[in-house]
Image (tube, rainbow, N blue to C red):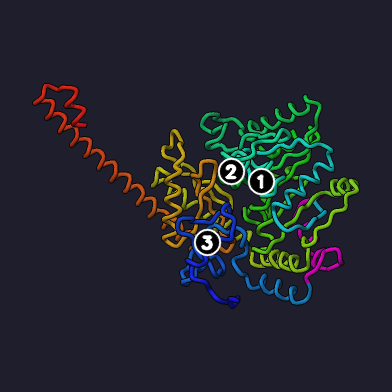
Amino acid sequence: MMDPLEQLPKSDTIKLRERHIGQSCKLFYRSSPLKIVRGKGQYLYDERGEGYLDCINNVAHVGHCHPDVVRAGQEQMALLCTNNRFLHDNLVLCARRLASLLPDPLSVCFLVNSGSEANDLAVRLAEAHTKSTDIIIVDHAYHGHLTSMIDISPYKFNKPNGPGKKEHVHVAPCPDVYRGKYREEDYPGEDLGVKYADDVRKICAEVKAKGKGVQAFIAESLISCGGQILPPKNYFKNVYKHVREAGGVCIADEVQVGFGRVGTHMWAFQRYGTDVIPDIVTIGKPMGNGHPVAAVVTTLEIATSFKNTGIEYFNTYGGNPVSCAVANAVMEVIEREGLQQHALKVGNHLIEELEKLAQRHAIIGDVRGAGLFVGIELVKDRTKKLPATAEAKHVVSRMKEEKILISSEGPDNNIIKLKPPMVFSTENADQLVATLDKVLKELEDDVEEVSESMSAILKTGQSQIDRVNSTSGGSKSVLIKAK
């Protein structure tokens, strides 16, 4: 038997993964995967001790292996880890703290294990409350890997071999004002939040015209997999109004963007004003800093409807003492270290520097973000806005070589997404921008070099054809041979 502390050679790790891990399980940097063995703060380290600046892991919210979070988990694990159907203080204290961070009337918590599970439960709550099954989602959205979540995730079901859209699912356009259905330059002066929300109103009307009711509208408060999209100001305000008038409830998916990441607020939905309050909020990833813990927070009214179905709900591991100890520690660290305010300061600096970078590189079509949730959209042409997909892939690969980990996203995979741990610093931001500047300059130089080479080849070829024409009378057969 192998010593549990023994490190396999990277080649053996790859061989074992290929043999025993499902082939559909995706790795970052598939052609040259990283073997990460340690993390600290905003850095990851491979088996050789090489450090990488981590701009990907929004899961490690307060930094990889934060000592206070690690200690809380260790100490509770040494005492007790058991079913949540026994009374334990960690569960109720965690629920109370979560509820205190959310506006009224969001006050009732369900503790679960993952964001996927949280979204699945949210849909169950909505169905119990409305007695309807028709659900409205946003195009390109992703809400989790469970079968129920694949059904409401166009990011998955619209793939070439995906299962396709179910009849009870209704897809509204992604509220992308840069390359979406309604673009800022095409509708100058118009409120695009209202315009995109009107498409949701039309869906509600179509559902009601068929004698049905709307169960729910679910969307990320900031749309991540769909391309780091920040919906326009009045979008959610109007969408929530239309959905509620149709008898539905509104679910805010905060799995990727909650717990202060946007800087100005604890939750991303709060960016849109005090009159935008969801009926159900789902929370995941950052809640446990890498430990599997998530939550659903809703109103007493909806929780009562769920209870009245007569189907008992319990979750063996959701809300266990260890998970709750970890979550409590994460919330304590966010508050004590002022990480929400830190995200605002560093995020503003990062976006400002990226906007300067966009002035030097035409491939950057758009820079958008809030706090430490940032997207850089790469385009081949700023007028036509054609996605620079291959270029984005190249940038991700080159940045890895420069020891900075980023990834690309969006329906055309042309958007560089940045969601680093919240301890990401202004110095890290400057390093990221300087390195990205270097990589984009290389890319531009390569394109220019290829263009010059092609131009020289074409000129040489034309000269040869002209010489042949001058001596042969320009016969068609000689021209074809010359080409």
Q: Which residue is mark 3?
A: 54
| CB-based contact (under 8 Å), mark 2 and mark 1 | yes
Mark 2 and mark 1: Cα distance apart in space: 10 Å
In this rendering, position of residue 253 left or right of residue 299: left
Task: Residue at 45%, 61% (x, y): give it.
Answer: 431
Query: What segment is highlighted magenta in the picture?
Result: 81-105
Few, some or many residues within 10 Å of mark 1 (<14, 14–19, 20+) = many
Task: Residue at 73%, 52% (x, y): give it.
Answer: 117
Q: Which mark is residue 226?
A: 2
> Could you say whether the residue bearing mark 1 is in a helix, strand or loop?
strand
Say if the magenta span includes residue 364: no
Confirm whether residue 165 shows in the render: yes
Task: Residue at 45%, 62% (x, y): give it.
Answer: 403
- Residue 426 x/y as whole percent: 51, 61
Q: Which residue is mark 1?
A: 220
In this rendering, position of residue 75 left or right of residue 159: right
